[in-house]
Image: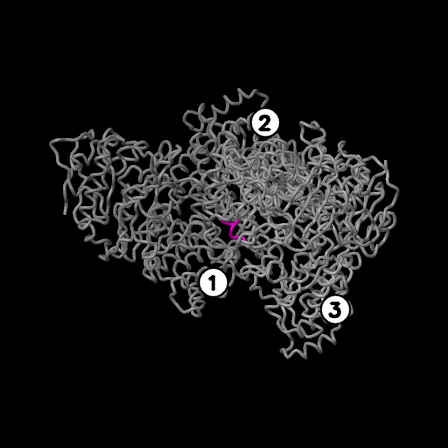
Amino acid sequence: MTSQAPLLSVKDLKVHFPTQDGIVKATDGLSFDLESGKTLGIVGESGSGKSVSSSAILGLHRGTSAKVSGEIVLNDTDLLTISDEQMRRRRGKNVAMIFQDPLSAMHPYYTVGNQIMEAYLVHNKVSKREAKTRAIEMLDRVGIPQPDRRVNDYPHQFSGGMRQRAMIAMGLINNPGLLIADEPTTALDVTVQAQILDLLQDLQREFNAAIIIITHDLGVIAEMADDVLVMYAGRAVEYGPCKEILTHPEMPYTWGLLSSVPDVTGDTDARLIPIPGLPPSLLNPPSGCAFHPRCTHKDKVKGNLCKTEMPELLPGNRGPEHTKRCHLADPEQIYFTEILPEIAPDLVEEFAEVNPDGSVGDAEPVRSSDAAAEAEEKKI
Amino acid sequence: MTDQTVTSDSGSAKSAEQSSEFAASRLAGGDGRDAILEVENLRMYFPVKSSGVIRRTVGHVQAVDGVSFQVPAGGALGLVGESGCGKSTTGRLITRLYQPTGGKIMFEGKDIAGLSPKKLMPLRRDIQMIFQDPYTSLNPRHTVGAIVGAPLLIHNVVPKKKVLPRVQELLEVVGLNPEHYNRYPNEFSGGQRQRIGIARALTLQPKLLVADEPVSALDVSIQAQVVNLLQDLQREFDISFLFIAHDLAVVRHFCPEVAVMYLGKIVEIADRETLYNHPQHPYTQALLSAVPDVKQAAIGGRRERIRLEGDVPSPINPPSGCRFRTRCPLAQEICAKQEPPLLQIGERHKVACHFAGEIGQHPTKPVTARLLGIDDQGNPDPGATPDPNAVEQPGFADTWYDVQGGHLGAKA
Amino acid sequence: MTAYIIRRMFTGIIMLIVMSMVTFLLFFSSPVNPEDFACGKNCSPALKAQTKKALGYDEPVTTQWVKFAKGVFVGRDFPDDPALKESAPETIAECPAPCLGYSRTTNSTVTEQIKEAWPISLSLAITAFFMWMIGGIVFGVIAALRRGSIIDRGIVGASLVFYAFPTFFIGLFLYKFLAIKWEIVKIPEYVPISEGGVSVWFQGLLLPAFTLSLVYMAGYVRMTRAFVLESMGEDYLRTAKSKGLAPRKVLYKHSMRAALTPLVTMAGLDLAGLMGGAIITEQVFNYPGLGKLAVTATRNFDLPLVVGIVLVLAAVVIVANLVVDLLYAVIDPRVRVG
Amino acid sequence: MAINRKPIVAVAAAAVVSVSLAACGGGSTSGDGGGSSKEASKGGTLYYLTRTSAEHMDPQRMYVGRDLSNMNRLVYRGLTTFPITDDPDAKFSVVPDLATDTGTASDGGKTWEFTIRDDAKWEDGKPVTCEDFKYGISRTFATDVITGGPNYILSYLDVPVAPSGLPEYNGPYKGDHQEDYDKAVTCDGAKLTLHFRNAWPDFNYAAASLRSFDPYREDKDQGEKSNYQIFSNGPYKLEGKWDATQGGTFVRNDQYTESSDESDSRQANPDKIVYTQGLENEVIYDRIIADSGDDAYAITDRRVPPAYYTQVTGEVADRSSLVDSPYVSYLLPNFNQMKNLKVRQALYMATDVVASTTALGGDKAGTPAKSIVAPNIIGYAENPNFTAPPEGDPEAAKALLEDSGEKLPYPIKFTYAGGTPTLDKQAAALAEGWKKAGFKVTLDPLTDTYYTIIQKPSNDADVVWGGWGADWPSIATVIPPLFDSRINLTENSNGQDYGNYKSDTVNKMIDEAAQIADVDEQAAKYTEIDDQLGKDVAYIPLELTKFYFVRGSKVTNYINNPMTSGFPDLGAIGVEN
């Protein structure tokens, strides 16, 4: 990450929902940066806080009982300090969002064109006719055949893939600097998913937009993201460049995600290693490391530390850009000796050669103390 | 549809019936065990009504159109494909939630396709289903004990007072606390509910489990738990599986043999090594290339993606000839005229494509032409005679056609 | 579309035939004998038999039904007694087709009775309909927008009260205070527009329509509120917000459109039901509409009138159902009829 | 039968009968301010508010006491009529109306002669003739058209009877055997002569009470279709049409002359009388008590609902009247079930009429009755067998029951017309008394099906409830209809003999009474029969229903005439101008 000010900088974001039973800390102290043209992947299970965080960036919690604190700086403006009206003017213009289920995300009673135009008209002083021309242009751009005709169709007349394309057209019509895609392909078939992911990448190049892609599918992350943020129980548990995280994960939860999904090339006799137990309650998160009740490696940490003390999000041995929230002293060794040989024995060597900067081959690992020091500096 | 396709369709259906005797005698699994389920030319057409004063049937949604396969005893067949390909309908036909339009469903050698609900009753014990959505498939007003125990009472399997101990035993088997039998489904998480669904399916000790997307509604970390559970159960109770899913990786992980469906038909079926490593059908290839692969992608080893254009056509009016041809990068004239037969091209490998071949190695001339008695453009060739064995049958024969070398012929 | 309408009409007619049969059967399986009513006090068995014959109830149910069905197409005479027709033709009441029967308790043909009562019920139904739709939607939306506030609780509570109290009670209460004690409104009375003009017609209608609308409004407030709240949780509303639309536009264009559509079905059917008469309201306010007519007919065991009203009401509901379905197809692009 | 037994739907046959009392009965003790308030004055509009719609406006078909007396005062003059009085103790008497005198009986009461006035006119100006009377009386014989009305004439008139029990003459429409009728009813100029099979010594009372014997214009008769036609010969006529459910408006009939009417029973004070039917009781009393606008000129035939009693105070009380009605309610032991006389006697002894009346609303609802006959009926006497105190004598009852030889507690099922809290309370109050005496009571409330069920001979109730009012002021219209087993008991129904009482002694005495020509002698005979009924405990009297009315403040000369059933007398009432 460069020293130049990023497009989006989220610092210590907290989204808390007061309920009758207590406060649900859906997101609890989340920080990340994102530059234009880059993609951040946020991965986690349902209830990990990944969708809540992105809604907070759009200010969708305004007017509800949710308590949002911290900083969300977009284009040098802290979105949490501006008025509702100012926030509204940024929605769809500076930051747009596409959702998981394009069928329910579009209003069933209005034509696709109408809904796309609406997004344009609200931020641009143009005639309806111009807006429609623009909408057709965008539909064409996202690969809808015969856009001048389909613009008058209703969402139910579109296929799932086309609906998601139309949603993307709607999101990008104002050329926003930031696009948040919340599980954009989960409801789609694999071939359609591939089409959509390709489209997003093409468009990102064209518009130089920053993208936050939220998903539970590490495969999507692997294809799309420059940086990865792994969330668990409302907190980031591992954060770093995509390739680095996928080849040298240092947090047992990330290991769990990697080892619990089969892939189409792996060893078929290998057994999946599931993460035991259930995701934690956000009302009463576990003490210490929130993952410790499900962690199979907590015995490797002395003094019951995992249970009593929450680890900080700090760099490990792999350099300052790769941070994780874990007490394990030498996670790399555990991963390469205990986990990877189980799930992908053929990849152990290849993975081991990947350097923190993404290059392959011999390189001097950064000393952990230096990395820690650098991280400290960054904090200040 | 051209006239020609019609004749060819009816012709294949007819000869399928003729050869069924032969097919039934074939062996199923590589381990030499008999097939517990053999499906032959299974069809399910949902009528489409006209909008006139009298509602005539003007067409059919050909949800499943001539599907044949075997499920080996104690084995697992995977059924993959995109939404609308007919895989779930196939599952429902086998559990006889639907009455098939045609074809045979041989379960342990007995055709259950046309059985009356009354005669089906004892068979329902043997064939059970696990559903996709653990939230809607359990009655929220019944306790878990009642849900799991209901089949026992309906089929009068054990005396009433023994139902509870059996229910608790089952809950323990699927990894739930047996003391929770009197709780309601909403007190459980999604994964736990799917376990309840599995327990219910296991209650009657079925021989065949049809699992329709059993893990796709679950969180990733929970998916693995359920997949592992199903694998354990299969081993422990010797249950055969028809495993239906859209997730190619999960199917590959679970099933030694996998069939790929497209628009109501099986386009390719093979053992998993062959299917995933050496797919010959352009659709299978496209499907596989679209699956993101974490580990490969991480080291930059991403495969070239085969882009499919457009959407799946309507099953009411499927394309003539090969149904995939409208989206196929290889399609030629013959594809519109002739439906490619599901041809056995390897020991345990069948594919339905005129231009079957591995990626980048597809032949330029149709490999099926001579076999079907037609020329390379798909027109009838008066000089050639169609091979009567080139019709779809369940299971695999001892002889197959070699397309590798670009020529046809039997190989021992 | 036309074919669809014809098909629906056809099934509707079959339903009407079945309903007329069921009504006949129910009537004759009742333990009470209609001739006992007509005969009066001190009736000897012979006199009773005579009365039964005069009423036409001595024939088998099937014969009676066939005669009824025939009458619908070709008309009938009452009483259907050739001897009497010859000797005293002036006593024979003619009932031209479509003859739904002749009501002895009101001494006119059922068709005439319904023709007289219908505009009254219609006036009441339509006036009430507008009152409750406007009130229901306005209060429902306010409650939904101020969810959890005192206003919301007040509206929901009040609608619950009106929902819980019997119409009879609300009607009498309003009658007593608004019309009698405080004389805010006129004592309800039906005056046709042709006689008193719109203003007098409306004044006489105000109280019963208001009573009726209060009862229905209660339901519509709660439904509107629920639908608006439901629509506010929809994904497409989140989409609308994330586009940067103004809250007002999100509410009116996106939320309301979705929330109010399901009301169309209910409103249509409720209105249709009311066209068949608001039984209790008409009773309380002595409004001689179809509802009151139905009660009187049942009370007097006047079979022809009962059957006639049942059929007319059923026909209205059947047509209303069709209209609602067609309307729905217009409102909701996802729905196609055919 | 008491009127308000059925809260909303008065269903069964007999329930219709329950409101169909002819002009008779009436007051004994006047309550708070029964009589007229102010002097009558001519002019103005009177409003008549009511709930129950008139079923018939055809004189030969109407049978409801209210309609019989009201229409007599307004539009339908008869041979005779009752004079205006508000004296609750007035003896019944009749005065000539369209006839020149009250009629002359001969041949032991079997032949009656009247002379019709020559100066009375129909509303179209044509004179009322003897032939009109003859035609009117003949209409009742058309039993296939003229249904629902009183049919006494069928069994009295001296015409041949077919095996079915009905006369061979079948009315003027079909006119079979017209000659029989022409012999039995003759017109000689203005002289009308009627020949009866049996003595009918009080026929002129019946003629005053019922409208069956009123004249009818043949050229206006359309049979069934004339049901709501009102063709007047009285001081008022109908303006426009009568609406079956809503009512109608009466205006002055310019063809009516006071000189043609010497009955002195039609003061015809208001210029206009507006009838509004179909109003709920609560609405009627809300309006009348509020006394605003037109409602100050309103009267009603509906009783004050018990819930409104507390509102009848001060000024409102001045506008109220409490009088006796002609309706008596009673209990009937079922003789198919309760065959032991001692048990029936015990039941009577244990019956707590005071508690029962209290449950109904106390002294504004009724007073304990001492016979099934109302006190002002000719032939009324306190039944000497009913000597127990009104609140019953459980001790004596217990003794009787123990003496009866039956096993105790004696189980009884009480079937009554229920469905409202008031009626259920009444039944419970009665049951309470019976329990004290050693009965074990099962309550069986029925609503719409009440009469249908108790009329079944196989009904297994031990006690049922009943109510009755005389058709004209004669005990002869009470005892035979209720206790003559020959006319009531058939295979399928017990008619109005709900207790299945069957006594040859009583039947024989009824036959004897029918032969007596003198009114008083006949009445004395019936009193004897009542005594016999009391000995058998054929019935147990409960209460004589009270009428409790409130009227508008601008109503003048308000009279509840005991001779016209205790309803407001439209012959006298006027309004302030």
- Residues under numbered marks 2 and 1 in contact, where contact means CB atoms less than 8 Å apart: no
User: Start and end of the magenta stretch?
Assistant: C25-30
Q: Which mark is residue D386?
A: 3
The CA distance from mark 2 to mark 1 is: 55 Å
The chain holding disc 2 is: A
Find numbered disc 2 in the image and state the secondary structure of the residue it sits on. Answer: loop
Task: Confirm whether the magenta stretch covers residue C321.
Answer: no
Left or right: B78 as drawn, with respect to A53: left
Q: Which label sits in the foreground, 2 or 3?
A: 3
The chain holding disc 3 is: D
The CA distance from mark 2 to mark 3 is: 94 Å
Any part of residue D10 in sight: no
The chain holding disc 1 is: B
Do the residues indicated by labels 2 and 3 lie within the same chain of the protein?
A: no
* Relative image position of residue B193 (x, y in whole percent): 47, 55
Q: Which label sits in the foreground, 2 or 1?
A: 1
Depth order, front residue of A233/D193: D193
What's under tag 1, amino acid-wise?
Answer: Gly
Depth order, front residue of A373/A203: A203
* Relative image position of residue D363 (x, y in whole percent): 80, 59
